Structures are given as structure tokens and as C-alpha cells.
Image (cartoon, grey):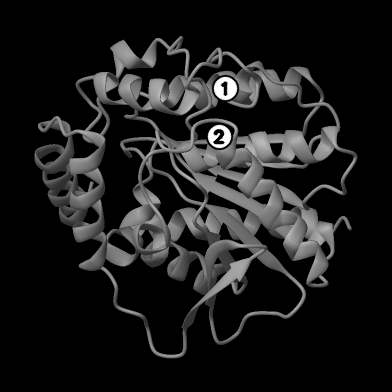
Amino acid sequence: MNIRHTFWRFFLRRTFKNKFMSIAENRVYSLNQARRMQQIPQGVEVKRFEADGIPAAWVIPPDAGRDKVILHLHGGGYVLGGIESSQAMCILMAQILKMKVALPEYRLAPEHPFPAAVEDAVKVYRWLLTQGYEAKNIILSGDSAGGGLSLAAAMSLRDAGMSLPGAVVCMSPWADLTFKGKSYITKEKAEPILREDVLRMWAAAYSGGENPSHPLISPVYGNFRAFPPLLIQVGGDEILLDDSVMLAEKAKSDGANVTLKVWDGMWHVWQALAGLIPESQQAFEQMGDFLKIYDNRH
């Protein structure tokens, strides 16, 4: 592993793994950390807008095509995050994929528990359709909880009879809020960011009074029939590793076209470090290769 990889693993462990913070404390801390990475490269445009009443931002690289768009759903355990927390990652994703990114701020728990986030994600997708984007040219992506949310949104769209996105891309998805994965135990020492006790607090906040095995809360228990092509990227050192493995197995058993990429030695949503480690850029290049395959089939 390179020096930057080693440094950031140490930094993240000291910053996140070794501290227990309430949701309120975590929101303040995460926002302050994100604001330190707010540099916008020359030529990239970031502008706020509203999608049917939902706050959002466009991230537009200079060479973005007009027809395609990524709808990215941010992570944060359904209780944290927003435009500022995901801006740096979305800028790099937009630059490498040469696509516009729509980044909405869906409602957060505990103030707005399930199904608020799913409703908002579906609403923004529908709004994009009204703006002239064809469903096949919308890529639905998400990291961590946003990865689980992208799956739930696609399921909701399918069940409503809507045209589905061209592909779904999940980065370290939190796809099972019932905590069945063995990697919570086997990867506990290797994981530098996530803590099971914190995730359980967030899961309770999001689930509210609903059973956490509800397929739109834990998509590993959902049905993946007639699902868009799915790319899953996950770090080999994550306590959420089994979420991705179980997700891929379930989707494949339902007939979905699934690509699972396990990155050895990587941690939860390493893509969020943007250009600070080479692996983040390489992950987005892998996404680009995946999307080209399915773009050529349309």
C-alpha cells in the first residue's frame, strides 16, 4: 500500500472509529470536515437548485454531455450528510465520468424516518424525467446508506411501473439494517471508520416503528426481478462487506445483472477521499468502464 493510503487509514481510525458521537455531534463534526474539502476545480460548476421542492445541487464538469446524468444519493446512515458532505466526491465522479451529477438533500432521520428518504429519491428521479432526461440516460448511484437508498428507489420505481434508470451504482452500500452479516465480527479490527454500536443507533432512528427487514429499508430482502444493471464496489476491510456480498447473491438469484468488485485493503466509501488517494480515482474509472458496457447495449 502507498504512503497516502497508510496515512488516511490511520487518520480515519483516529477520527471516527475511536470516538462515539451523538447524531447531533456527528452532524456538526462531519459538516466541518467536509468544508475543509470545498475547493472547486477550475471549469467545474456547482450550483444549487430545487427538484420539486427538494434542495439539490448540480455538479457540472466542463466536458459533460447533455443527455446523461448521474443522480447521486449521499451517505451518512440516513441521519447525516448533504450537498457539502458529498461535493468533493461528486466533483471527481463527474470529472472522470464526464457526466453531470444531481446531488439532492433528501430528508434525514430521526426527524424524518422511513419512508421519507425513499419518497424524496423517487421524487427527484421523476423530476429529472420532467426535465427531458430519458430513463436509460439516468444513472442512479449512492454511497453507504445512499447505496441502500438507490436500491430502494429503483425497487419503488419498478413497482410503480416507471421507466427504470440505465444502471445502479452502489459504493459500500448499507443494504441490511438487521445486522446479519458476519463481517461485523470478522472485519471489526480492520475497519477504520464504522462502529456497529453507532450504526445500530442510526438504524433505529431511520427505521422508526417499521421492521428493519422491510425490503425498502434493507434491500437485501427485496426482489431484484427486472432490475437495472448493478455495480457494487466495497472495501475488503469493511464491516459492511457482507452487505455487498449478500446483496450480489440475492440480486443474481433473482436474475439481475450484477457486478461485485471487492477492493482488497480498502475501507468504507474510500471514494469520498476524492483525489487524496489514487484508489478513489481508480474506483471511478472502474465505474466508467462498467457504464460503457451497458451504454453500448442500448
For numbered disc 2, what is the local secondary structure? helix
Q: Is residue 202 above or below residue 34?
A: above
Q: Residue at x 56, y 55 (%)?
A: 72
Rendered location of residue 288, percent (x, y): 61, 60
Left or right relative to 162: residue 215: left
Left or right relative to 26: residue 231: right
Residue 168 marker: none
Residue 218 marker: 1
Q: Amino acid at mark 1?
A: Ser
For numbered disc 1, what is the local secondary structure? loop
Circle 2 packing at 10 Å, graded few (<14), some (14-19), many (20+), is many
Q: Is residue 242 above or below residue 95?
A: above
Left or right relative to 201: residue 4: left
Q: Amino acid at mark 2?
A: Gly
282 or 52, nearer to the observer: 52
Q: Residue at x 59, y 69 (%)?
A: 50
Q: Quadrant of the C terminus?
A: bottom right
206 or 233, nearer to the observer: 206
Rendered location of residue 121, percent (x, y): 63, 48
- The residue carrying mark 2 is 148
52 or 276, nearer to the observer: 52
Q: Is residue 96 above or below residue 254?
A: below
Q: What is the distance, in whole Å, between disc 2 and disc 1 at their CAs?
A: 7 Å
| Residue 171 appears in view | no
Are the residues tagged 2 and 1 within 8 Å (C-beta)?
Answer: yes
| Residue 142 appears in view | yes
Q: Residue at x 36, y 54 (%)?
A: 272
Rendered location of residue 232, percent (x, y): 57, 38
